[in-house]
Image (tube, coloured by chain):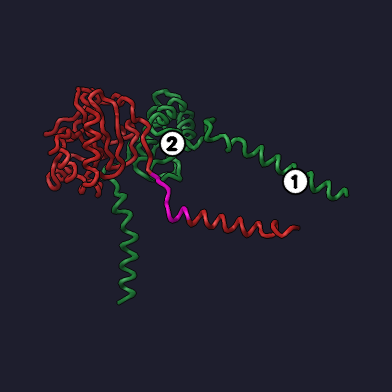
Amino acid sequence: MSRAIRFAPLVLLVVIIAALVWRLATPADTSVRSTMIGKLVPNFRSEPAMVKKMDFSSSDLAEGQPHLVNFFASWCVPCIGEVKVLQDLKRHGVSIYGIAVRDRSDDLADFLERNGDPYQRIASDPQSELQIEFGSSGVPESFIVDGKGVIRYQHIGPIEPSDVPMVLSKVEQAR
Amino acid sequence: MKRHLVLAALIAAAAAPQLVLADSNLPPAYWSNRQLPDPRQEAQAEALMEQLRCLVCQGQSIADSDAELAGDMRDLVRRRIAQGEKPSAIQAWLVQRYGTWISYRPTAEPAAWPLWLAPFALLLLGLLLLRRRIRVKEG
């Protein structure tokens, strides 16, 4: 057996360990991208989330103006911090439609009273059906839908204050 | 004192993921943990649920996962099967939203070709090795 072959297992071991160390140091992105970008929002009709607030259906997303559709929930901790950023976006003229995932109207009212209410309308999604329609996999998640009702952009996780200029430009592009 | 600190840190670390992955206060969807009355339909639903990947616990199928979203997806699968929809149509509907990622079943797209070719390549390699050994013995 030649010398090179004798060292092959050792080299293989080093390669495997190097690969494992590399993967640990740079974890893979496990977020699930929706494949609905560039497609029309699927037809849906929602139930009102609260008595005071209007809900919306897919046709309301195709009336000429772009919207930010925000999946959130009163039981979602990162959503609390996101409210302030959404209010900032609202001040900049972004129309925000909320979809409350698996929520109760009492909890929702409490959440909005405590943290603020940036939403123009809120639809209820008690069985995650709308979430699955959009190809979304968690809360918070946001979609920019243009005036024709085409999904243009998906934001996974909370929108951070540093994301505001980027989101605003995406909304501008969708006009 | 130090030990208490360590213990407190461990408890905090164990509790932290639950804070982040909080669950809602709503009960599971009706069909998420309930079998369909028709055993043939339930078998169809079960087979499909086993090959759909959970969006939250990505190593598990929605049949195995306890995540709420997986429960809602089981409810969706069972409801649609009960309405007479074909499992392949339901799968296609989900693939349209999440890509082929959602299914554990390998497809014929180019990215999966090495997967399909691997058994043949390995078999060929095995045969070659075997042939070499037999030859050595003959010699």
- What's drawn in magenta, residue-wise? A22-30
Residue B115, quarter of picture: top right
Residue B17, quarter of picture: bottom left
x and y percent of residue B33 in the render? 38, 39
- For disc 2, the marked residue is B102
Give the mark, 1 or 2, whose residue is nearer the N terminus. 2
Quadrant placement of the N terminus of chain B: bottom left
The green-tinted chain is B
What residue sits 29% from the left and 47% below the top? B23
Identity, as a three-letter code, of the amino acid under mark 1: Leu
x and y percent of residue A162 in the render? 23, 46
Label 1 vs label 2: CA separation? 38 Å
Residue A75: tell me if it is visible: no
- For disc 1, the marked residue is B129
Residue A104: tell me if it is visible: yes
Q: In the rendered view, would you say A77 is above or below B8?
A: above
Q: In the rendered view, would you say B62 is above or below B6?
A: above
Q: Nearer the viewer, mark 1 or mark 2?
A: 1
Q: Colour of chain A?
A: red
Mark 1 in CB contact with mark 2 (< 8 angstroms) = no
